[in-house]
Image (cartoon, grey):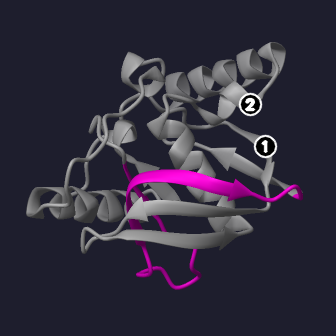
Amino acid sequence: MIRPFVMYPDKRLKTAAAPVGAVTDEIRAIWDDMVETMDAMPGYGLAGPQIGVMLRLAVVDCSDSRGKAIRLANPEILHASGQFREHEEGSPNLPGATAVISRPRAVTVRFLNPAGEMEERDFVDIWATSVQHQIDHLNGKLYIDHLSALKRKMVIAKSEKYLRRVG
């Protein structure tokens, strides 16, 4: 099921999500909805708070063909490279606007996988960017929080203008 997005400045987007106690059938069903919602955007990832699910759940799929979504519960970054890369980021919670954000090029992340097992995985380039973007959402942070106050105001104004235009 494609779920509706929580729109900025909804306070849930600034609230840290609660840890997942265990991977259950209910959690797997939420992940399935998240993948379907992400693919409909289309986008490279989605975190629970973006659709009003205040749990530390995320999905990421940066593959060219899609259908390779990684499902993460309680993801945490164990290591981030000292090398950074820039990528233009956006969010369906703040549509019609993007900004270039610099993040570590590679990260090692520990998370609960769909089998309920702890897994560690290395992510590089766009995969690393998307995972970090989703973990930010789980911590109550948006990509615009990486910007200067002036640039943040400009991105928010651009999104507001876009929303007025599309009705």
Q: Residue furthest right?
A: 83
**Residue 132 at x, y = what percent?**
61, 50
Residue 80 appears in the rendering: yes
Please report the residue visible at 42 percent of the width from the left and 23 percent of the height from the top.
15
Residue 149 x %, y %: 78, 14
Q: Write the start and end of the magenta stretch as one range.
A: 57-83
Pinpoint residue 17: horizontal percent, then vertical percent: 36, 33
- Compared to residue 60, the image places residue 139 above or below, namely above
Q: Are marks 2 and 1 in contact (CB under 8 Å)?
A: yes
Q: Which residue is more in the foreground, 94 or 29?
A: 29
Q: Position of residue 27 (x, y in %)?
A: 18, 57
Viewer-proximal residue among 24 and 69 = 24
Q: Quadrant of the N terminus?
A: bottom left
Mark 2 residue type: His
Query: Residue under circle 2?
Result: 146
Image quarter where the C terminus lies is top left
The image quarter containing residue 107 is bottom right
Distance in Å between CA atoms under marks 2 and 1:
7 Å
Q: Which mark is residue 19?
A: none
Q: Of label 2 and label 1, which has the lower sequence position?
A: 1
Secondary structure beneath dot 1 equals: strand
User: Where on the picture, by quarter, is residue 38?
Assistant: bottom left
Please name the residue that numbered disc 1 is placed on: 101
Asked if residue 85 lies left or right of residue 59, the reply is right
